[in-house]
Image (cartoon, rainbow, N blue to C red):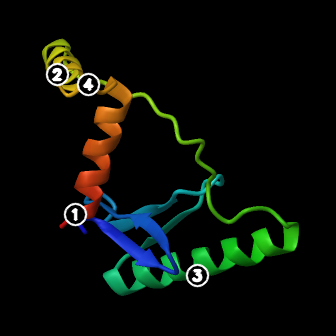
Amino acid sequence: MKDVLTYKGFIGSVHFLSDDNVFFGKVEGINDLITFEGETVKELTDAFHYMVDEHITDCEKENVPVEKSYNGSFNIRLTPNLHRQVAIAAKMRGSTLNSFVKEAIEYRMEHAD
C-alpha cells in the first residue's frame, strides 16, 4: 500500500507538509474526524496507533460502532465515452450496468496487488 499506515484493521492516510517539516494523517473509514502527526515516521506511527486505540476505547464506552457503516451504494463518475462503452458491454453480455460494474469491482478485489 502507498501512503497509508495500518493498525488493528484501521487505515491512516499519510502526508508530509514540507513548510512545517511534519508528517500528518487522518484515520480513514470511521464516522469521527481523527487526525495525527509527528516529525518522524516513528512519531507519526506511534501517534496513529495511539489515536486508533483511543478511538476504540471511546467507541466501546459510548457503545457506538468503531467503523463507518456503508450502505452498499455509491456514485461513480466516468467520462461520457467510458460510460457508453460500459453500458454497451453490459448489454452485450445480457447484464445490467450495475451488475457489470459490481462484477468488475469484485474481480479487481480478488486480484488486488
User: Distance of mark 3 from mark 1, alpha carbons?
Assistant: 29 Å
Give residue 44's position: percent from left, percent from top. Answer: 41, 77
Q: Are marks 4 and 2 in contact (CB under 8 Å)?
A: yes
Closest to the camera, between mark 3 and mark 1, is 1
Q: Residues within 10 Å of mark 4 (few under 14, many from 20)?
A: few
Q: Which mark is residue 112?
A: 1
Q: Nearer the viewer, mark 3 or mark 4?
A: 4
Q: Mark 3 or mark 2, which is nearer the start of the sequence?
A: 3
Q: Residue at x 50, y 75 (%)?
A: 9
Disc nearest the viewer among 2 and 3: 2
- Disc count in the image? 4
Q: Kindly report the distance in space between the C-alpha atoms of the residues bearing marks 2 and 1.
A: 26 Å
Please, what secondary structure does the residue beneath circle 3 have?
A: helix
Neighbourhood count class around disc 2 (C-alpha, 10 Å): few under 14, some 14–19, many 20 upward: few
Disc 3/disc 4 C-alpha distance (Å): 50 Å
User: In the picture provided, is 51 more to the left or to the right than 88?
Assistant: right
> Does 47 appear above or below 25?
below
Q: Residues within 10 Å of mark 1 (few under 14, many from 20)?
A: few
x and y, in percent, of residue 70 in the image: 58, 47
User: Along the polypeptide, which appears first: circle 2 or circle 1?
Assistant: 2
Q: Which residue is mark 3?
A: 50
| Residue that numbered label 4 is attached to | 94
- Report the residue marked by disc 2: 92
Disc nearer the start of the sequence (3/4): 3
Mark positioned earlier in the residue sequence (1 or 4): 4
Local secondary structure at mark 2: helix
Question: Which residue type does callout 4 highlight?
Answer: Gly
Q: Quadrant of the C terminus?
A: bottom left
In this rendering, the answer to whether 65 lies above or below 79 is below
